[in-house]
Amino acid sequence: MAITAQDVKNLREMTGVGMMDCKKALAASDGDMDKAIEWLREKGLAASAKKAGRIAAEGMAYAANIDGVGVVVEVNAETDFVGKNEKFVDFVKGVAATVAACAPADLDALMECKYNGTDLTVTQQQQEMVLVIGENIKVRRFARFADGVSVPYIHAGGKIGVMVNLEVTGGIDATEIGKDMAMQIAALNPRFLDKSQVTQEVLDEEKKILLAQMANDPKMANKPDKVKENIVAGKLNKFYAENCLLQQAFVKDGDVTVEQYMNAAAKKLGGTITLKDAVRFEKGEGIEKKQENFAEEIAKLAK
């Protein structure tokens, strides 16, 4: 039976075992997934296989500047309690240190890197953590910034991790400015960093909605097209102000935009700052959490 890359990926997701071991297991089991899991367990590689199937939507988002490299990671666990566990937090910080040192191209590459300060891969260290803590644990995603000035911010003990990456001139300390911008990102979660990033497709959709709203408004429906276009242009500026970080009102001073604050603060320090990039990770976002029905669970156990 032919073994595909998707088969290897599926087995890895089910067991948390490294790619090469999953490939060996499938080859030894003629592609049979159940037999491959059994093979891995017999080899002592998938002792945590059952836990790996459970949904991990808690955990921690973490951001740090490590030796000049900006890193933000999300590592998931099953319960909020474990997300505060000291060993779990240390594991997350170790993952971040590994990202900084190893410069992996993607998540698969990261999982095969040597975990910081050990001879184990990140995958193997993750398996160790599953066995020690007793919950499914999963490194979910990361971002790395090797260039520029990276300013991290962690909100609510790891609920949200933000990294702001800046280009700074004049030798100024941009830490406070970057942190203010990161806090804004954490609080308002803008869709775009700047209005220049808004695609034509998004603009066309907004225009379509605004024109449809006017067509359904008796007071607006009969106005000339030119008037409608001017109204749409004005409303798009409001769209930018709500959805684009640099055009948003600065939370600490609503009379200026984030961009105006950034430029004025940098000028006051004697330099310039340009926002290059920013990443916001919120733990568990996009993961469907399992809703447990404890009455049903008890009923099943009683049978």
Image (cartoon, helix red, strand yellow):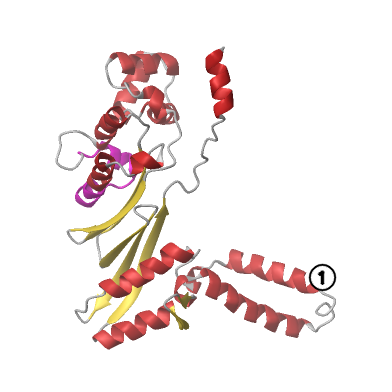
What secondary structure predominates along the stretch shown in magenta?
helix
Q: Mark 1 highlights which residue?
A: 216
Q: Is residue 164 left or right of residue 236?
A: left
Magenta region:
96-114
- Name which residue lies at 74% across and 72% down: 211
Q: Nearer the viewer, residue 172 or 109?
A: 172
| Disc 1 secondary structure class | loop
Measuring from the top left, give residue 218's x and y in whole percent.
Answer: 85, 76
Residue beneath the point at 23% across and 35% down? 121
Is 90 magenta? The answer is no
- Mark 1 Cα shell of 10 Å, populated few (<14), some (14-19), many (≥20): few
Question: Can you tell which quarter of the image residue 258 is in?
Answer: bottom left
* Amino acid of disc 1: Asn
Of residue 299 and residue 128, the one placed in the foreground of this image is: 299
- Where residue 200 appears, as percent x and y from the top left, is 58, 68
Position of the N terminus by quadrant: top left
Q: In this view, does 226 lie above or below 55?
A: below
Residue 119 in sight in this render? yes
Asked if residue 1 shows in the view, the reply is no
Q: In which quarter of the image is residue 257?
A: bottom left
